[in-house]
Amino acid sequence: MSVKKPERLLGYLKYNDIDYPFEFIEEDFSIVLYPPNLEEWEEAADIFAFFDNLIKPKSGGWIKSIKLEGITSEHYRIVFSVKDSPSNYHGFKSYEVDWFYYCREEYGFDQIEGIRVSGPEVNYFFPPQIALRNDVKFGEDNYIEKMTVSTTDEKTKRDCGSYSVKRGLSTSVELDAFATMHYNTALNPIDAASYMYFIFSKPIGVDDITTVVYHARCFFKFITYRNNVSFSAIETFYNKEGKRDFAGTIVFPSNNEKETHKKAADRIIKYDVLQNKTANLFKAIKLGKMGYAHICNSIEDRRHFSSGRMIMIMSEFEREFRNIYGQDYERSDLYISTKKEIVELIEEYRKSHTGDAKKYATSIKKTVSNLDNSYAQNVEKAIHDCEAIIKPFISHNYSGYTDEIINAICGRVGEIRNGIAHSKMDFKLDAIHLTDTKTIEELTYAIRLKKAGVPDDKVRQGIKELFSENVAV
């Protein structure tokens, strides 16, 4: 059974070894600490003491986060992660909240066995209809004589693989769907929801939960190609006599409007595509191999290609290409060894000199080390390597798939990338350049999903659905 969300979140928090009454303000995602007595209030209301604390330098120049623990009016244990820069309204301190976690009183903050995440994007990724069975009986003139919706006896759990969260801690990722009955209502008397589970190799604390939730957000951003993903609930479970007890919840501020596009359920790479390779994307996310600056805020925003967005798309492909293929992909052994020897010679020169000579040698060494193929060459190599995936889309969007078409695409995107990167916007952007940019988007997904071990036919299916390509794959 899940913990019940409190109607009002208030209680006591430990601050400077004193129990302060608190109230959570949901609209501002902040907490207010109320002085426990008149003496504490008078001290907190001292304007000179407040400004004395305010001007003290922060460690490293950054505002750090601190944790305040306590108990709620429902006797839940609770911990807030807050910015250590409170505002002070006549002795009543208010803190901006990063996140908060609460659980039933009998459990601790370091005994968490796993979490489950639910929300619209989880349902899109793994449609919960799998938990329901529909039966319709037709009478004369195709009149519906009887219609029933019931739970299914089929196995609904799906494996997504596992990955290492950090040294000494791994998690397996699973999906499941459940039906729910709503009594005394004619509107949706039965429905279903999907959940993504993270089952840890050992009990963990709340800080590790925040890391895994970050990985999950990045994953859903990637498979939807938009930032406005939302989780309805992030619940934690504990081990109680060998069974899962969903006794805790972690809550983050909602920074995005929920996606309202009518095709949102279709514009996503689904579990049927990734299957047990899902965790390979989590591995790449954990290792920092994937970027998100190019991802749009919503489905509607994907229709617009500003020069800034175009360069971010081009840059993301370039970064992914290096991560996946390496800097000197398909270069000869002689080229690689020659480059290495030249870099070593420059390093010897650098070590034996001082002043400007050493500075110039360092710059030259960096330039030689970073030498690689041109952008156009890398695009061509990626297209050929992912030909089984990308060919149907290029054939459809360019009315053919020939060497001339490929060379033209590579030449144009190389020109766009170099022109925008160096602020040389003296060329005209035509409709074909927008098609080229979309091709780079699809190619970036192709090389990443192929690297994750997803079969070519599944990658084609995923790209078709994510980018709404009207092509048979």
Image: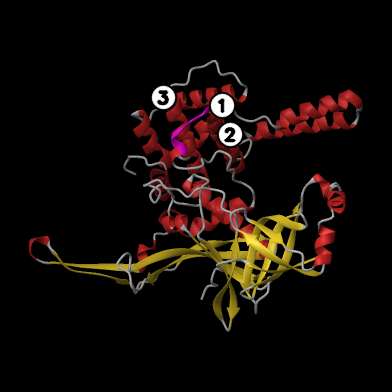
- Rendering colour mode: secondary structure
Left or right: 196 as drawn, with respect to 457: right
- Kindly indicate whether the residue at mark 2 contacts the one at mark 3 (C-beta within 8 angstroms): no
Please, is residue 448 above or below residue 309 in the view?
Answer: below
First along the sequence among labels 2 and 1: 2
Residue drawn at 43 percent across, 54 percent down? 270
Residue drawn at 36 percent across, 65 percent down? 130
Left or right: 363 as drawn, with respect to 436: right
Residue in front for this viewpoint, 181 or 142: 181
> What residue sits right under mark 1 in the picture?
417
Any part of residue 375 in sight? yes
- Kindly indicate whether the residue at mark 1 contacts the one at mark 2 (C-beta within 8 angstroms): yes
Q: Does residue 40 show up magenta in the picture?
A: no
> What residue sits right under mark 3 in the picture?
431
Q: Amino acid at mark 1?
A: Arg
Mark 3 is surrounded, within 10 Å at the Cα level, by few (under 14), some (14 to 19) or many (20 or more) other residues, namely few
First along the sequence among labels 3 and 2: 2
The magenta span reads 301-307
Question: Quarter of the image containing the C terminus?
Answer: top left
Mark 2 is surrounded, within 10 Å at the Cα level, by few (under 14), some (14 to 19) or many (20 or more) other residues, namely some
Tell me the CA gap for discs 3 and 1: 16 Å
Q: Amino acid at mark 3?
A: Ala
Residue in front for this viewpoint, 140 or 372: 140
